[in-house]
Each structure stands twice: as structure tokens, then as C-alpha cells.
Image (cartoon, rainbow, N blue to C red):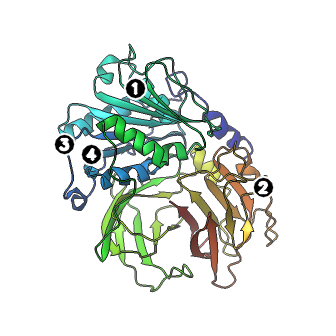
Amino acid sequence: MKLIPFIFWFLAFIPVNGILYINTSEEFHGDKVVNTPTYFHQNCDDSVFPIVFVHGFLASGDSYEKQALRFMANGLCPHRLFMFDWNTVSMQDNTEKLDAFINEVLQKTDAPRVYLVGHSAGGGLSYSYMSQPERAKKIEAYVHIGARADIRPPGKEGEVPTLNIYSKGDPIVPGADIPGATNLKLTEEDHYQVVTSNASFEAIYEFFFQNQPSTNDPVISQRDSVTIAGKAVSLGENQPMDNAQITIFELDSESGMRLSDKPLATLSVDSLGQWGPVEVKTGAVVEYELHSEGRTVSYFRQAINYDNPFIYLRGLPSPSSIAGRMLSSLPSDDHQSVVVIFTSDRATVHGRDHLSVDGIELSTEDFATAANSSIAWFLFDANQNQKTDTTSIPTFALAPFLSGVDFFFDTTESISHRANFNGRIINFPNRKSASEGIVVIVFD
């Protein structure tokens, strides 16, 4: 298992530009165009070029969830916003798949060109894609975020209008100006903030539309209910969790416990990973329980106050895959819970951020270095001594973006726990990791 984190670290820095790929014949459908439910299409502007978002290594389309919601708040139709979910672990040449995806977007929207946005490794993929003139002609303008700088904008002759956003505070890809591009150098944003921040949204919106956005915030629902939908994919590989089921329960926000054993809704995941839409009470705190052929995964997020068609749920990948082999170390043990915490809009950095569970600080100098840019925290009793030792879990120690901490959640009796990230609170129950599944906390 010690080699697996090193592989993840190594893959994170391989150029995604055709220099190295591992060929595979595995059928993959995570890169197909997903339609937002028709409910979300009301009272919006579908006259603009569609926007295609390309995420980075180990990520999914919800890297852009905040920005997509901001575009919606400024009147754009969600069916003009498309996430290209690609398998960043296999290291296939994904340029053909991205081309097929963009072609399908053009066909569905009847648009002549698209706006393209690439973050991190998604920026390398986007550059590779636009290296052929016939592909570059499909791009009205391009935004390069938190990715390595090239000597010129993309296209054979550097002809694609480009906004290059990078940050001095990004230790993963420091970035630099691209000659001939519009360049925005941020100062403090980490590798994830550079794609989720207000400053980046304002720059992207103005670059695309030549005026400033009217708001930076999602529209708070004035109705009694909000409508939600999204996608269910495998962690790291973005394989659709087809044939899975999602059960949604309303929770007591003070305990994280279910208000009733009767679910608000039970939904099927289709062949493209789509689920929903479903209406839930405005301001409700809910649990999303994802049931698949593998282990059950229960998601706990903050209260829902606005319509959102971009909620991603991740299941465990196949045990035979690279990501699956790494995650096979997660215990399946009814004497303890396995808890994963995602801080999806920013990394957790010691001295800047505070992440704790039940008052025990996780964002220490040992676990939350700026260089690691940790956004996913795996917590379980790795030492198997039924104690919280807060020692490092070696499986995750060398992997970028991930941290593992020995933390014991006793399941002898049903109790609540409290996660606190920079003052945002999510309460959650202890679940038996074998029979009840894995608990995932998402700070969005």
C-alpha cells in the first residue's frame, strides 16, 4: 500500500498534454453530457455560448459548483453549464473524449462555439485539446485556472482568447503570466480557492461577457421548498454509479440524527449518473445515502437554501482500480465509524484554517501543511486500539490533497459528533462502518 500514495503524488505532476498516457480499453461513461432537469430551465438566459468546465486531478465537476450557482444567480440557464467528468487516474488520452463532449454540447444547444474553463490538470487537457486548429475553432474563449503557464495562449498559433488565473498562495501549481493572455495573479488563494473564489468568478464573468456580474451569491429561495439534483460518480475515476439508489432523509440540525426513519425521497441513478430532481424544505439539513454494489456512503452537508442541480455524490470505485486499491484500506468494522471530511471550496491550512471534530484539532502543523493542500480528511482507528491517537495514517501521508488521521469513533451506542470548519458546523451520527457504511461530511 505504501506505493499507492506515491503513485498519486507522481500522477499529479505528469503533464496532461499527450506526453504520457496509459492506454486502457475500459468503457467509460462519466464524460457524457448530462442534462439538467427541466425545472431549472425557467426564467433564464439561454442566448449565451454554453460553458464547458474541465476539472483537475482526483476531482469532479463539483469543483465548479459554486461558480455554476453564481452564473445561475446572474441569469444564465443551467442547461448552458456543462461539467466534463473525466477519469484523471487512468491517464488515458482524454482529448478525443473532450472533443466528443464538446460536439455533443454544441449539438444539444445549437451553439456555434463554447466557452471553455480548465483547472489544474484540466488546464493541461484543455491546452492539448486546442492544439489542433479544428478543435480550437470550437472555443469562443478559454479560462486557464491554477494550471501551469505556457509560452502563449492555446491554439496552434495562440489564437484562442485566454484568461489565465493563478495565485501566489497556490503551492501545488504556482503559475505565471502567459504572454498574450489576460493574466490575473491572486495573492492568497490556495489551489482550490483559485477555482472557487469570488475574485475568480468576477474575472471569468467579465472576461466572457464584458461586464460585471450583478451578484456573487446563489439566489436564496423565497419558496417553502428548494429543488435539488445532481450526479453520482465513483471517487477519483468519475465512473457513473448507474443502478445505484439515493435515499434522502431530513435531519435534526443539532444532532445530525434522522427526524424519521421514513425517507423524504428514494431516487434511482441513471446510466449517466444523474439523479433527481427532488424538492426538499428550504433550510433543511438532509442526509444523502448512496447505495451501490459497493459500500453504502452517507453524505452530510450544510442546510439547503437555494435550488441546486449540481450536487455530486461519490461512491467507492472498483477495488481493482488504482483509487480502489488505495481506499481498500478503509476499515469495514462495526465497532467503529469511518468518517471522511471534504472542505470543497478551499484547502485546510495550518495557521489560516481551523478544522476540528468534537473539539480535537485536525488542522495541525503535522497534517495541514500548505504544501499538501488537504481537502479530504480520512478519519478512522487505523491503530486498532480503540483510541484517538491523532497520528498520521501512512496510506494517505504522501498523497497530495489527502490527509489521514487516526481517530476512533466508537459505535457501541448511537451518538452524535460535531465537525467544525472555520466556524461552520455539521453534526453527524456515528455509523457502523461495515453494516451501515461510510460517513462523508461536506463543507461547501
- Where does the image place residue 161, in percent across and percent down from the top left? 36, 25
Q: Which residue is drawn at 55% across and 28% down?
A: 148
Mark 2 touches mark 1? (CB < 8 Å): no
Q: How far apart are marks 4 and 3 (CA)?
A: 9 Å
Residue 186's tag is none
Residue at numbered disc 2: 392
Image vertical order of residue 160 relative to residue 369, above or below: above
Residue 438 quadrant? bottom right
Rounded to the nearest whole Å, what is the CA distance between mark 4 and mark 2?
43 Å
Left or right side of 357 for 126: left
> Upstream in the sequence, badge 2 or badge 3?
3
Vertical side of 189 occupied by 329: above or below: below
Disc 3 is placed on an element classified as: loop
Q: Distance between the residues labelled 3 and 1?
A: 25 Å
Q: Please name the residue that numbered disc 1 is placed on.
A: 129
Q: Quadrant of residue 97?
A: top left
Secondary structure under the numbered disc 2 in the rendered image: loop
The residue to which callout 3 is attached is 47
Q: Nearer the viewer, residue 77 or 102?
A: 77
Dot placed on the residue nearer the N-terminal end, 3 or 1: 3
Residue at 49%, 24% in the rendered image? 17
* Helix, strand or loop at mark 4: helix
Say which quarter of the image contains residue 111: top left
Disc nearest the viewer among 2 and 3:
3
Q: Cβ–Cβ below 8 Å for labels 4 and 1?
A: no
Q: How far across and down, in percent of the image, does residue 59 sit?
A: 51, 46
Q: Name the residue under label 4.
A: 80
